[in-house]
Amino acid sequence: MNTLFSQLPSIDSLLREPALQTQLQQCGHRAVTKVLRQMQDEARATITQQGKLPIWHSDWPQQALAILARQQCSALQPVFNLTGTVLHTNLGRALVAEAAIDAVTASLSSAVTLEYALDDAGRGHRDRAIAALLCELTGAEDACIVNNNAAAVLLMLAALAPGKEVIVSRGELVEIGGAFRIPDVMRQAGCHLVEVGTTNRTHLKDYRQAISENSGLLMKVHTSNYQLQGFTKAVDEIELAGLGNEYQLPVITDLGSGSLIDLSQYGLPAEPMPQALIAAGVSLVSFSGDKLLGGPQAGIIVGKKALIAQLQQHPLKRALRVGKMTLAALEATLKLYRHPETLVQTLPTLRLLTRSQNDIAQQAERLLPPLRQSLGDRFTLEAVNCLSQIGSGSLPVDRLPSVAITFSPKDGRGSTLEALAQRWRQGSTPVIGRIQEGRLWLDLRCLEDEAHLIRMLAP
Ligand SMILES: *Cc1c(COP(=O)(O)O)cnc(C)c1O
């Protein structure tokens, strides 16, 4: 064992290795030394426990470089999203527009008028510019921006109905992924949930009968990730707003996705629009910035001036407010909606959602030859029609016709498929597909940089 220990190189000699000199310059002496010490500890443990040297003993510098490279890899690594889900929550949802990226860069590299009004040299309000834009686009009186839509719902409830009853239909007590459940948020906000109606049918009279002197709000929640079908009845916003008016109770709607344009004009499933609900008389509407809107993560609340003022003054607003990066990206994204004719080009989310199956099929035909050339000996490659999803709480039943390239292992083994998927996940730009029916599927809907993908898959 002592002879094994004596074979371990010294830190000093390793630090003089020519192969490590570039890393020493880039990462610094301290970081490289730390990695080398860890390697020495690991080597000693291997000797003590297994009576042999570690397998990488033949090339210490190479092993150190591999560890340093892993350490430098970002936790937010860019990947190819070929899962078939356009707004993929685990992959960061919407890709923002070029204009939004430029605006964020500008906001980060300079002092900005975040809470500073140039005209009177006093303190401005950080949501003000975006509130004006949102009012222009939705017809609302005012707006408030927070960290995400979950925060928006929490703030509306906590600020407008603390200790009071909030009346919601039993058909709308939703759970969105990631521990967002309406009854839980209600409790956190200090409100009492009053459920009305039944799972499949709720009538206006159900809400009316539940109203008492303890009522604080009437609430609607968009059932974004499921659909009630068959013998069903829900009360629409116009009716509920009428009832709210009658009893002087605000009506709020958690819209979830919420699109500022009519998606049916592109042949996409229609999603409710915030401006339609404002026009219907709803007091406050909340929706996400990074779902169909195609902007940064944010929660947007639009509606009545007096209620927005209550939200702005609530202590939770300070805790949930967004930073200048978010505001810059949101403002630039919203400005694109002033030119709806060009949105299909300028807004990546809409550009990807509206790609035709024909366009994607042509892309698949271009990709097949180079991919077959490098992988065709072990896999059968085919272009197959498939269905993409919008994702992030848009109806899972609404699918978009798309095309995937599928890879079936010629040896018929699942492990061959797993190995391929794993190799692609470990590339410098990982490629994320899905395994289904004994094949690996790459849905091409979200593929824009073809040449880059070919470099990753067929090096
Ligand atoms: C997505 C969604 C939320 C949560 O929004 P985040 O922006 O992810 O916080 C809340 N309610 C509904 C109806 C949703 O669809």
Image (cartoon, helix red, strand yellow):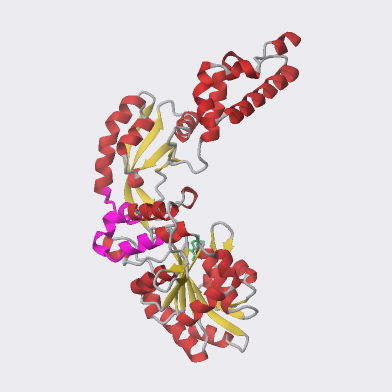
Please tell me whether residue 180 belongs to the stretch shown in magenta. no
Q: Spot the residue most to the bottom.
A: 246
Q: Which residue is drawn at the image coordinates 43% and 51% (left, top)?
A: 109
Instruction: Count all numbered tags in the image, as a single digit.
Output: 0
- Measured as percent of width and height from the top left, residue 179 is found at 59, 59
Which residues, given as a range, are shown in magenta? 330-357
SS assignment for the magenta stretch, majority: helix
Q: Is residue 120 above or below residue 9?
A: below
Would residue 389 be visible to someone looking at this image? no
Q: Is residue 322 left or right of residue 184?
A: left
Q: Where is residue 349 in the image (x, y as percent from the top left)?
A: 35, 55
Quadrant for the N terminus, please: top right
Q: In this view, does 192 lie to the left or right of 118?
A: right
> Is 337 part of what is drawn in magenta?
yes
The image quadrant that residue 70 belongs to is top right
Q: Where is residue 360? Give x, y as percent.
A: 28, 45
Q: Is 246 placed above or below 131 here?
A: below
Residue extending furthest toward the front = 121
Q: In this view, does 348 lie above or below 215?
A: above
**Picture quarter containing residue 214?**
bottom right
